[in-house]
Image (spheres, rainbow, N blue to C red):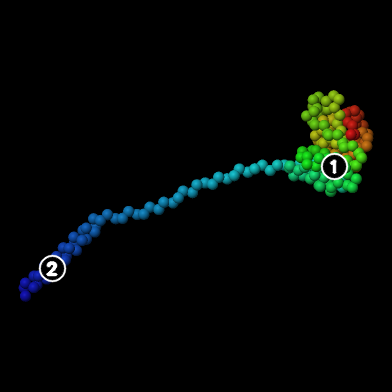
């Protein structure tokens, strides 16, 4: 009986020893390293540089069109666009006298002549004036019925405001029939008319 008790005590002792040894080994096992999550870097996206929007242009449409006048058109417009803005040619217009594919420029005049009439001469360019600033060069004439605002400003005493009034008068009343008719434009008196009389022609 005593041997049986001693045997059970030995077994319990061995179990305790095994348990202690197992606990010691488990404490010495290195802990698992934490998982590192890699977050992909977000690369900045390239922003396209803004493109400049071409400025609209202002042109004067005269002659055999439904509604002569000054019109604002988009950049890169052509003569055909100017004629369309003025309501299109009239029945007696010599539409074939103009190259309707010509590209427009700011301040340009588009004159559509009637059938049987000669087209207006091209307006003078300010670059052609080689005399003193603000006046046409010697022997250079400004075509009153076709000059744009910039060209009109080359006349002595004519600034941007007065050039605009000349074009507005021309738009409302049609081409000038005489140089003296300039006196009907607000701001042009007898003295100024005498200064520019010899430097302008109708056609």
Q: Is residue 26 visible?
A: yes
Which residue is rendered at x = 80% and y = 42% of the image? Answer: 100
Q: Which residue is mark 1?
A: 96
- Of badges 1 and 2, nearer the viewer stands 1
Q: Secondary structure at mark 2?
A: helix
Q: How many marks?
A: 2
- Residue 98 on image: x %, y %: 83, 40
- Say which quarter of the image contains residue 71: top right
- Say which quarter of the image contains residue 140: top right
- Residue 72 on image: x %, y %: 78, 44
Which residue is rendered at x = 85% and y = 42% of the image? Answer: 96
Q: Is residue 161 visible?
A: no
Cα distance in 3D space between marks 1 and 2: 124 Å
Mark 1, other Cα within 10 Å: few <14 / some 14–19 / many ≥20: few
Q: Which residue is mark 2?
A: 11
Tell which of 118 and 143 is nearer to you.
118
- Residue 117 on image: x %, y %: 91, 39
Tell which of 152 and 186 is nearer to you.
152
- Residue 151 on image: x %, y %: 82, 33
């Amino acid at each position: 009986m005593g041997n049986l008790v001693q045997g059970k005590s030995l077994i319990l002792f061995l179990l305790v020893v095994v348990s202690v040894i197992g606990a010691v080994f488990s404490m010495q096992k290195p802990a698992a390293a934490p998982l590192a999550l890699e977050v992909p870097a977000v690369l900045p996206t390239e922003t396209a540089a803004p493109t400049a929007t071409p400025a609209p242009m202002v042109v004067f449409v005269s002659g055999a069109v439904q509604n002569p006048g000054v019109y604002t058109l988009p950049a890169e417009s052509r003569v055909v666009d100017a004629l369309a803005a003025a309501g299109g040619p009239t029945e007696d217009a010599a539409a074939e006298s103009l190259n309707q594919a010509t590209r427009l420029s700011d301040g340009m005049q588009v004159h559509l002549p009637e059938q049987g009439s000669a087209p207006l001469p091209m307006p003078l360019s300010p670059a052609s004036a080689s005399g003193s600033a603000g006046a046409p060069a010697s022997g250079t004439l400004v075509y009153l019925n076709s000059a744009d605002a910039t060209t009109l400003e080359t006349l002595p005493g004519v600034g941007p405001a007065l050039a605009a009034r000349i074009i507005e008068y021309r738009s409302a009343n049609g081409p000038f029939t005489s140089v003296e008719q300039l006196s009907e434009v607000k701001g042009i008196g007898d003295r100024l008319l005498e200064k520019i009389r010899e430097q302008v022609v109708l056609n």
